[in-house]
Image (spheres, helix red, strand yellow):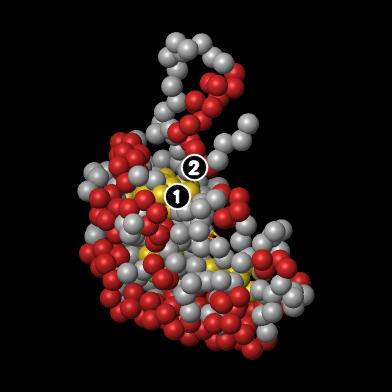
Amino acid sequence: MFIAINEYDEIWEKINGLIKLEKDSSYTLDFNERIITTGKSYAYLKIAEGCSNNCTYCAIPYIQGKYVSRKMEDILEEAKILADKGIKELIIIAQDTGRYGEDLYGKPKLTELLNELCKINGFKWIRFLYTYPETITDELIETVKTQDKICKYFDIPIQHISNKVLKRMNRKSDKESIEKTIEKIRQKIPNVILRTTLIVGFPGETKEQFEELYEFVEKTKFDKLGVFMYSKEDGTPASKLPDQVHYMTKKSRRDKIMNLQKEISKENLEKNIGKTYEVLLESTSFDSKYYVGRTYMDVPEEDGVIFIKKTKEIEIGSFVKCKVTDIRDYDMIGEIIVK
Ligand code: SF4
């Protein structure tokens, strides 16, 4: 039996039909009673399945199907359950969060959804990831700026900056619109953190196109950045493109950008020394001498952490105020100033 990703609601019916359970079986599946595997402090909340963007290198649209938004009331109901369970940080995800609602309501509704989520008691931080540049509207920027609960953090996977490469990737944004969006966000929200992901070695990527990307990274100084080497996904249009880039060239291009970003990250982090931030404590170090936490500037599992000298017992999952005293390549060191 096969069940599509967006057919959760029908799972019970289908299983029931298959194994012919008694009609009067009183057992029901409640998908809102989900198991949280990310610990006590944060949880992901998926607002849509699938993707309709059809980037030429990506197999997700073939595997998961078209973009299907969840109903807003269902998302809000699940969010309330998470808040009642004590989750402090809600992380909104989808393959492209900015397109939320387009299929269901005829227009994007991410901004409205975020405003509704902010009304739920319990969450201290709400953030959304994977927002493509062309979906970032003035209203969305304004909501991030004005809603206290929303982390001033934009995750904008641009993948490349050369217009020729973007076109071959079938990306919807071009260099000019990406630059404009970044400039607008930084101008409206001065303390914003910008994250992006890039692909190097896409078929046909020339030395000049790679250099254009390198210079863009050097100039833009993203706070967080991930670089992937292009890898062929069976059945995708890009896998059939000519001029596939040699593995060693891809690796060298990735390493060049990662080395550059290491310096940029250090430079960006150094600006935090002496500043005070709210930190969500998530664990302790292996030797139990430090708490390990995050500020609004870091996404779990992707970005850095802050290590805080353990001077007293504080419950994991609490927020504390910390002063940044030092940095490492991607992490910070701090001390608690107020419980
Ligand atoms: S890369 Fe992202 S936006 Fe593009 S098709 Fe894949 S999932 Fe969709």
Tell me which amino acid carries mark 2. Answer: Asn
Q: Residue at x 61, y 75 (%)?
A: 168
The image quarter containing residue 83 is: top left
Query: Mark 1 near mark 2, Cβ–Cβ under 8 Å?
Result: yes
Q: Residue at x 48, y 31 (%)?
A: 10
Against 61, residue 327 (above or below) is below
Residue 208 can be seen in this image: yes
Residue 77: quarter of image? top left
Secondary-structure class at tag 2 = helix
* Residue 119 % position (x, y): 22, 48
Q: In terms of image quarters, where does ligand 1 lie?
A: bottom right
Q: Which is more toward the observer, 215 or 290?
A: 215
- Residue situated in front as seen by the camera: 50 or 83: 50
Please state the horizontal and vertical placement of residue 306, each as a whole percent of the image. 44, 59
Mark 1 lies on a secondary structure that is strand
Q: Which mark is residue 68?
A: 1
Is residue 178 depicted above or below 66 in this figure? below
Q: Position of residue 56 (x, y in %)?
A: 61, 67
Q: Between residues 95 and 338, which one lies in front from this camera angle? A: 95
Disc 2: which residue: 6
Return the disc, 1 or 2, that comes first in the chain's sequence: 2
Relative to residue 37, is residue 227 depicted above or below? below
Q: Is mark 2 within 8 Å of ligand 1?
A: no
Marker disc for residue 169: none
Q: Is residue 83 visible?
A: no
Q: How many marks?
A: 2
The residue shown at (57%, 36%) is 3
Distance between the alpha carbons at the discs numbered 1 and 2: 7 Å
Q: Is residue 25 above or below residue 163?
A: above
- Relative placement, left or right, of 115 versus 40 is left
Q: Name the residue located 53 percent from the left edge and 42 percent from the top edge.
A: 5
